[in-house]
């Protein structure tokens, strides 16, 4: 039988299947070092990854798989290689393996095993070429407060690349979806020169309690050899690197619940200021004034709501435009909520803008504060002026509208804040007479290129989900339901607008925000209230 099997193998040119084999570059490590390990499957068809587990004291990370085919003496050998990275955490003697690989006809034969010796690092503490320090500051915060996780990598060796393999995380303190900041500085001390990489990652406290967390895990590729050069003369791209794993110390954050606030106060936590100003200091009748109300500072303004102007005596108030931006900086999460409204004076005389306010929780004083603007009174002059005086606080200009007069002319009303009257003269008519024939000739010449472009246009993408489909897809889990409903409401409000439905949507979004921060339970009538907001849905605005 063995002779027949060998004869068939030689005739078909295919090698026999062997048990899996564990291979390593070396089995003697120091604490903190990383070595590559491979599980090689020869002439097999695995259905899943090998069941390879690392003993306590070693950390095992899957690094991908490759295929290898060789042809020797008429025999084809196919190998499937599973690559792993093993990092040494503690001193000791460890055994890696044996392992089995799931195959189409069951588990494979057991593989070999390797003995790994891990010894203490021969680099004295404080003299290591790479060191990592990471911490939260502050460690005692309020619910809703945004705090930084600082990490400083000090390197005395050349580094090709660094990345976080793990960052601290818990149910009560979670990272934000914001781009971390990173700066690199060069320094020198008694031991020589070094590079210091400082990284700041934004986190937000979402649930009261004491939350211990594991420290960050940073992977750095240290350049070992720059002498190898490519045929094109580049050396840095072909440098040999050595992976190093660095671990930060465990951290703990204490999250305090917010004290009871005024009735209707929303969980807006941070250090903010509120200011307001008109775009025109000395308006005339009919001028379009841009009234700007801006809340800005360090913190999250997702739940912030400011009441816009609704009605002013002696003026026409138009719809509000809401803008919200945030950026993670060295100081923290800098957020800006800006409301702009067009106001057109209808009569000559004083035009009064009332004081506006919002209640926030100050992380500086640890108390609720009501931010209030000062009332502003403008003296409206006669109309028929095209010169606008714009303050430095505004970034848009107004436009003229009504003719002059002590009061608005009977029967004439503002045609809109962006309306500008144009008078067509003889030169304008001459321009049209010269332009129309040239435009017609151009269209005739472009009809074939336009037809080819229309035929080669890309196909439209998939159909956006309808409101009913998104409503039906809401999950049952309370936390996932609150997150999905919150995202749906943000899509409904993304294009802006005012009215009863928009007010209901903003109120429901505020209740969901309070529920996610643990300030209130999840609304029991969530689905019916969402269904009533169907008219606000615009798939193209997502």
Image (spheres, rainbow, N blue to C red):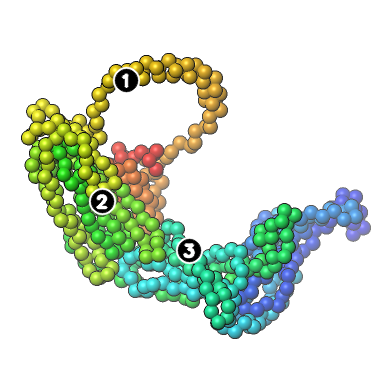
CA gap between label 3 and label 1 equals 58 Å
Which residue does the numbered mark 2 point to in the structure image? Answer: 393
In this rendering, which labeled residue sits more in front, label 2 or label 3? 2
Give x and y (percent) for residue 91. Answer: 63, 82
Vertical side of 425 occupied by 300: above or below: below
CA gap between label 2 and label 3 equals 31 Å
Residue 108 visible, this orientation: no
Vertical side of 39 occupied by 72: above or below: above
For mark 1, give the secondary structure: helix
Give x and y (percent) for residue 415. Answer: 20, 30
In this rendering, which labeled residue sits more in front, label 1 or label 2? 1
Pick whichever, 145 or 78, lies toward us. Answer: 145
Residue at 21% from the left image edge and 52% from the top image edge: 276
The quarter of the displayed image where residue 371 is located: bottom left
Q: Work out whether mark 2 precedes mark 3 in sequence or the reverse, and give the earlier one.
A: 3
Dot 1, crowdedness within 10 Å: few (<14), some or many (≥20)?
few
Residue at 72% from the left image edge and 69% from the top image edge: 24
Q: Work out whether mark 1 precedes mark 2 in sequence or the reverse, and give the earlier one.
A: 2
Give x and y (percent) for residue 398. Answer: 23, 39
The quarter of the displayed image where residue 312 is located: top left
Give x and y (percent) for residue 63. Answer: 64, 62
Q: Work out whether mark 3 precedes mark 1 in sequence or the reverse, and give the earlier one.
A: 3
Residue 70 placement, left or right of 468: right
Q: Residue 83 carries which label?
A: none
Vertical side of 101 occupied by 308: above or below: above
Which residue does the numbered mark 3 point to in the structure image? Answer: 182
CB atoms of marks 1 and 2 within 8 Å: no
Residue at 33% from the left image edge and 65% from the top image edge: 145
Residue at 23% from the left image edge and 48% from the top image edge: 391
Which residue does the numbered mark 1 point to in the structure image? Answer: 427
Residue 491 visible, this orientation: yes
The quarter of the displayed image where residue 107 is located: bottom right
């Amino acid at each position: 039988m063995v002779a027949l099997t060998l004869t068939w193998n030689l005739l078909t040119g295919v090698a026999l299947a062997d048990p899996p084999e564990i291979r390593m570059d070396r089995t003697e490590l120091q604490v903190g070092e990383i070595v590559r390990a491979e599980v090689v499957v020869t002439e097999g068809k695995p259905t899943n990854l090998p069941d390879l587990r690392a003993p306590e004291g070693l950390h095992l990370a899957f690094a991908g798989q490759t295929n290898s085919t060789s042809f020797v003496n008429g025999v084809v050998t196919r190998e499937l290689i599973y690559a792993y990275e093993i990092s040494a955490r503690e001193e000791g003697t460890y055994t890696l393996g044996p392992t089995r690989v799931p195959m189409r006809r069951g588990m494979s034969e057991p593989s070999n095993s390797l003995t790994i010796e891990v010894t203490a690092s021969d680099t004295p503490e404080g003299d290591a070429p790479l060191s990592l320090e990471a911490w939260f500051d502050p460690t005692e915060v309020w619910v809703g407060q945004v705090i930084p996780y600082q990490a400083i990598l000090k390197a005395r060796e050349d580094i090709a690349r660094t990345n976080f393999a793990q960052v601290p995380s818990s149910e009560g303190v979670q990272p934000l979806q914001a781009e971390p900041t990173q700066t690199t500085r060069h320094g020198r001390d008694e031991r020589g020169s070094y590079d210091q990489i400082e990284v700041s990652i934004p986190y937000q406290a979402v649930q009261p309690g004491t939350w211990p967390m594991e420290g960050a895990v940073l992977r750095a590729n240290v350049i070992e050899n720059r002498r190898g050069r490519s045929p094109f003369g580049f050396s840095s791209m072909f440098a040999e690197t050595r992976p190093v794993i660095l671990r930060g110390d465990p951290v703990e954050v204490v999250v305090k619940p917010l004290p009871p606030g005024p009735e209707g106060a929303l969980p807006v936590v941070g250090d903010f200021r509120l200011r307001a100003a008109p775009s025109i200091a000395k308006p005339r009748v009919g001028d379009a004034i841009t009234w700007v109300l801006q809340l800005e500072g360090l913190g999250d303004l997702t739940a912030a709501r400011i009441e816009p102007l609704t009605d002013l005596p002696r003026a026409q108030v138009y719809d509000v435009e809401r803008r919200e931006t945030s950026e993670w900086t060295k100081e923290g999460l800098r957020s800006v909520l800006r409301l702009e409204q067009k106001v057109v004076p209808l009569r000559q005389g004083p035009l009064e803008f009332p004081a506006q306010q919002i209640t926030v929780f100050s992380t500086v004083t640890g108390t609720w504060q009501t931010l209030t603007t000062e009332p502003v009174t403008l003296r409206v002059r006669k109309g028929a002026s095209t010169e606008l005086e714009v303050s430095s606080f505004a970034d848009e200009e107004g436009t003229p509208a009504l003719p002059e007069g002590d009061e608005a002319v009977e029967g004439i009303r503002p045609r809109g804040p962006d309306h500008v009257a144009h008078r067509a003269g003889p030169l304008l008519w001459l321009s049209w007479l010269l332009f129309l024939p040239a435009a017609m000739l151009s269209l005739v010449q472009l009809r074939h290129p336009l037809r080819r472009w229309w035929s080669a246009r890309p196909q439209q993408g998939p159909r956006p989900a309808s409101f009913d489909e998104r409503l039906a897809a809401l999950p049952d889990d309370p936390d996932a339901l609150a997150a999905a409903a919150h995202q749906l409401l943000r899509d409904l409000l993304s294009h802006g607008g005012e009215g009863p439905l928009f007010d209901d949507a903003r109120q429901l979004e505020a209740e969901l925000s309070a529920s996610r921060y643990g300030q209130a339970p999840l609304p029991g009538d969530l689905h019916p209230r969402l269904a009533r907001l169907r008219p606000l849905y615009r798939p193209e605005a997502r």
